Image (cartoon, grey):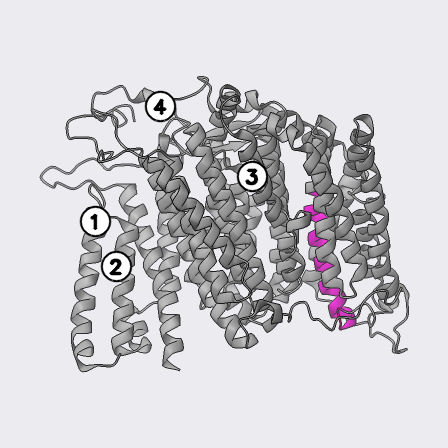
Amino acid sequence: MIETALSILVGIFFAVAVYLLLSKHTIRIMLGVVVLGNAANLSIFTAGRLTREVPPVIPPDLYVPEIATANPLPQALVLTAIVISFSLFAFLLVLAWRAYQDLDTDNTEEMRIAEPKADPLPPLSY
Amino acid sequence: MESASNPYGVDISQAMIVERVALADWLLVFPVALPLLAAAILVMLRSRPKLHAPIALAVIGVVLVSNVVLLSRVLDEGPFAMTMGRWLPPFGITFVADTLGVLLATTAALVALVCALFGSTSIDVTGKRYGFYPFLLLLMTGVGGSFLTGDIFNLYVWFEVFLISSFGLLILGSERAQLDGAFKYAILNLVATTLFLIATGLLYGVFGTLNMADIALKADGLREEAPLTMLATLYLVAFGMKAAAFPLHFWLPASYHTPRLVVGALFGALLTKVGIYALLRTLFLLFPEEGGALSGVIAIVAILTMIFGVIGALAQTDIRRIMGYIVISGIGIMMAGLALGDRMGLAGTVLYAVHSMLVMAALYLLVALMRKAGGTYSLSELGGLYRSHPLLAAMALLLVLSAAGLPPGSGLWPKVMLVKSALDGEGGWLAFAILLSGLMTTLALGRVFALAFWRPRVDGAVVPATPLDRSGMFALVLIMVPILWIGLYPEPVLAMADAAAASLLDPASYSLLVLPAGGGS
Amino acid sequence: MKTLILRTIAPYLSALMMIFSVFVLLRGHNDPGGGFIGGLLAASAFAIYGIASGVASARRAMRFHPMAIAGSGLAMSVLAGLASILFGVPFMTGLWAPPIPGIEFELSSVLFFDIGVYLVVLGAITSVALALEERDDE
């Protein structure tokens, strides 16, 4: 039941992320990247099976857990992914801010410094 | 060690590795551990940029030597694996030294060495202080880790490691064009790695393991019920984007010409090839049948990538941007081998990857030297370099021939193999596209050579024979050696590529290598 | 954010957070906690100090450049992993020193790895935070 609900939530997250990523403005694209990262994390979490209220902690004096516990690995994966996407996003934020300041625009269609519009068209110098 | 490893009186051999690890096995970790350590030390020495180049060169040299030793060991004694932290596979993270990974890691180390040498004079003190060498070493760590890891989530982590360091390298200099290019590069690559992460999460949901050997073992039993084709398709999209395959390649021409050219050389040589490597691993090792089912799509992507890439190159007048499109066209040729999927086709792809790493690095370095000699990147202004810099012209000619797949360069043999494999199978169109793209590459690069070297300058001025900096020329000569060696005496590398292709087509032996007991949980 | 209250309390608050971050780091040896979360706490301590007293004095308080601290942490983590080369076990194996009688503390390579992570996170996050705060000052 809860898996279905979470799957639908993941779907909504993806839809929002794609919508934002398709925007022209860098700030919306950045928000889209954040939502996309969260959608990915949530989908890993859901795909790793959900178990309620059984933390994977081995009691003292035992070497294996007594009962079936929640799977800690998807949580470890999500944690790793969060840390990585956090650091990438920190970089991206600084980059977008610098780009906005130096290029005087947050519209990606006007970001044409690297690929200037006025480039000569072929055939040229053949 | 016996008493220390067994402090609780429990039989730990069920969960942990108890055999002593041979010292020689550590060669497998050095390509990752040594550059990482060196990057850390160079970051600490950030106020003394003069020390950076010698330390970085020494460490990369050691890594290259250790990779060569590792390669010869793999060739002599066969592949081997090492699982980190003593946990038995599939629980510990495994590193695998097989011919494919080690061959590509060795080539990558060679390219990194040449670029580090080239950067020692072409990157100024500000760039060094900003962290050119630490980022380069971190990039090397990520690329080396990607080639050697046997764990799919660990592969994701290495992807992110070289992605972060590539961001740093891309904006070295903070020019406006760099910020523009870096933004597009960063967003699109981040989307690609997120797709990779999603695919890996779903894969874990299906298989309950992340060890590639274990996945390959379990795929057979799950083929009926699990959505493996969807997983394979997700990986194809994610890695196709990383590799700059046709409909997803737009980030590459938008960004690769903006950074310092030595950075462009590193990127053009290494980053897209890691995407191809990951495609080889996922589509052949993990999902061989699903990969086969996708071969039609891959063939179309391959043809479009190689043709559109080279059309882009023909349309440009900026020599840096021409090289960006040549990288894309080469990706198409490697994808052709993926579509063919037989032993000779895969060997052709592996050999082309090695060739492309060397030649693309050399071409970007050549562009840097042409700029120094001629003062501009524009083909409509360059000219007369043949008279002023004959040695550079000779190397340029060899590189043009090599990139176009003509003798005596290294590009000939992989293309011969791919075309033969395509004609033996039912890939007539692929063979035609490979030959056509070869012809068009000859035109695109021949135009560069004819205009920049043969033709006198348009304004009639005589190009001064300014001496080019020695370490830059030496770096270019250094990388020409393996290119010509593969071109003239291809047998050793050909045998390695063939062994790599054979092991790709035999997932069972890969699994046996990592999991001798025949599977964990 | 140059209020008198914040400026007065920030040094004490930062010091408290630093101590707590070390506590969390060492607690991570056997209980929830660890290098990453400890490093984040320490980084926020420096960030608060930077907000209250200016980036220049925060940098002076750190003595070393944040990236140099991160580099030293990375080196320590890698060396902690490489230490297992001496004992014939695979890379990154946790190694424990023989317990000293009377002291309830186990010295291990895992601890050094964690301290390395702490320093990496502290250095990298502080570096970003101070860079952003510097921009605000302009």
Residue B62, horizontal then vertical, whole percent = 55, 46
Disc 2 is attached to a residue of which chain? C
Q: Nearer the viewer, mark 1 or mark 4?
A: 1
Say which amino acid is labelled 1. Leu
Q: CA distance from mark 1 to mark 2?
A: 13 Å
Residue picked out by circle 4: B18
Please, is residue C107 above or below residue B45 in the view? above
In the image, residue B368 lies in the stretch drawn in magenta? yes
Q: CA distance from mark 3 to mark 1?
A: 40 Å
Part of the protein shown in magenta:
B354-377
Residue picked out by circle 1: C26
Please, is residue A19 above or below residue B88 in the view? below
Query: Which of pointers 1 and 2 lies earlier in the amino acid sequence?
Result: 1
Residue B29 visible (yes or no): no
Foreground of the two, B400 or A103: A103
Q: CA distance from mark 3 to mark 4?
A: 36 Å
Residue picked out by circle 3: B235
Going by the image, does B441 lie left or right of B132? right
Q: CA distance from mark 1 to mark 4?
A: 29 Å
